[in-house]
Amino acid sequence: MGGTPELKLYNTLTREKSVFKPIDAENVRMYVCGPTVYDFAHIGNARPVIVFDVLFRLLRHVYGESHVTYARNITDVDDKINARALRDYPGLPLNAAIRAVTEKTEKQFLDDATALGSLEPTVQPRATDNINQMIEIIERLIARGHAYQASGEVLFDTKSMADYGQLSKRNLDEQQAGARIAVDAHKRSPGDFVLWKLSDENEPGWESPWGRGRPGWHIECSAMSGRYLGDVFDIHGGGLDLIFPHHENEIAQSRCAHGTDVMANVWMHNGFLQVEGRKMSKSEGNFVTIYELLHTEKFASRQWPGEVLRLAMLMTHYREPIDFSVKRLEEAERLLAKWPAVEPGDAKPDETVLNALADDLNTVAAVQALHALAQSGDPSVFAASAALLGLLPKKTEIDEAVAKEIDAWVEARLELLKAKNFAEADKIRDTLAAEGIQLKDGKDLATGERVTTWEVKR
Ligand SMILES: [Zn+2]
């Protein structure tokens, strides 16, 4: 670890930034909640993929590549998956239809993650391969008095855990007093959640001591993290929206089943994502998938390289909310165009970049330092530093002065287009094309204004 700064991470459990001390420096263990595979992943789903990939890269740098275990699950059992299977494959038997949906979606997710420059996690367990582990934990919870059977379900008894709610700082009694919705009659307390529920013949199911059924959502992460990382491990990550109830309930299950004080020592959560200043939703018309950004012209009438999406994401600190916009993407693209494309070789990453990342993944400062290095640093040190962020600029022969000049021509052409002087505008486009510079016209989703970007074609 010589020469590497202390790693500091913000812990949602303590609401503090503190020095990270692994349980075992020979095997640093991290779990991140993965996708439910029934549909294309949207750009909000890309954020944890990228953020925790940067952390994975940093941990590998600090502790050694073979000393970090990163597990990210695939949720392939869920009522949304059943519904999608019935809709898309009505002719197939249910199990085959479900497999068709989950295999296709999982492959798409992994393709997206790779295009975004992310390394494959060490293990990517599927929920349906871990049903026995889930049944074991549920049996242990029942035996220890933390779970009960009622109306075809096995439920976790939240009242049985004295300090339930530590992560989200929620108080069960307050919740009950404030609850306006009638409590399901079969639950002992309104916060009690499903560990197992019986399936009918139209639902997927597995044999269990409680009859043929399927697991609740939360139990799978307790089972898979326990199997691959142990009863207590170092870091658990995910989006802010998972703190409650998902992560709270993971903690309840794992701690009560294993009799431990914590499930993971550090809990990390990335912030929300908006698109063009508004919450992303299908009804707002600003819902966009990673696939659409990469491969279609849905967003601002053009395709966006994975590296641009990645850098745009890292230009905001992971705990801050992010506004995903055309402007932001263009800014990232301009930066990347000015960065040299070189192989890192044996070079070590720059200290300023490393220090920034070691300070609770301050990717904003790291990107700034990287940009300074690109201007005046050793190119191979730049490349080694960029690789820590998963950014490996592709070769372009454009230097900054030329890039500025091209920007100016693009601006001039936009003015001409506004003035409807199409002949002159086309001349600029053709002149640039002759130099191997291709313009792409698009539209700013927020303002409706025309925007133009350029790239070098070889
Ligand atoms: Zn989870």
Image (cartoon, rainbow, N blue to C red):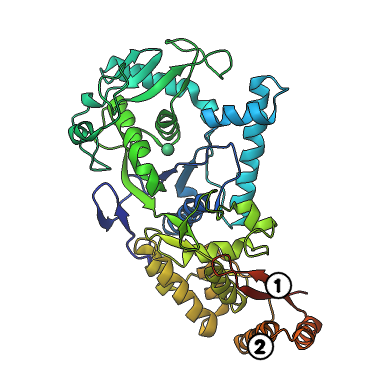
Q: Which residue carries the number 1 mark?
A: 440
Spatial CA distance of label 2 from label 1 is 15 Å
Comparing 74 with 95, the one in front is 95
Q: Residue at x 59, y 58 (%)?
A: 117
User: In this rendering, would 21 be left or right of 350?
Assistant: left
Marks 2 and 1: CB-CB under 8 Å? Answer: no
Residue 19 seen in the current view: yes
Residue kind at label 1, given as amino acid type: Lys
Horizontal and vertical percent position of residue 135: 43, 19
User: In this rendering, would 240 be left or right of 207?
Assistant: left
Comparing 448 with 123, the one in front is 448
Horizontal and vertical percent position of residue 258: 30, 27
Q: Is residue 307 above or below residue 425?
A: above
Q: Which residue carries the number 2 mark?
A: 412
- Locate the C terminus by quadrant: bottom right
Disc 2 element: helix
Q: Residue at x 30, y 29 (%)?
A: 181
User: In this rendering, would 7 be left or right of 297?
Assistant: left
Image quarter where ligand 1 lies: top left
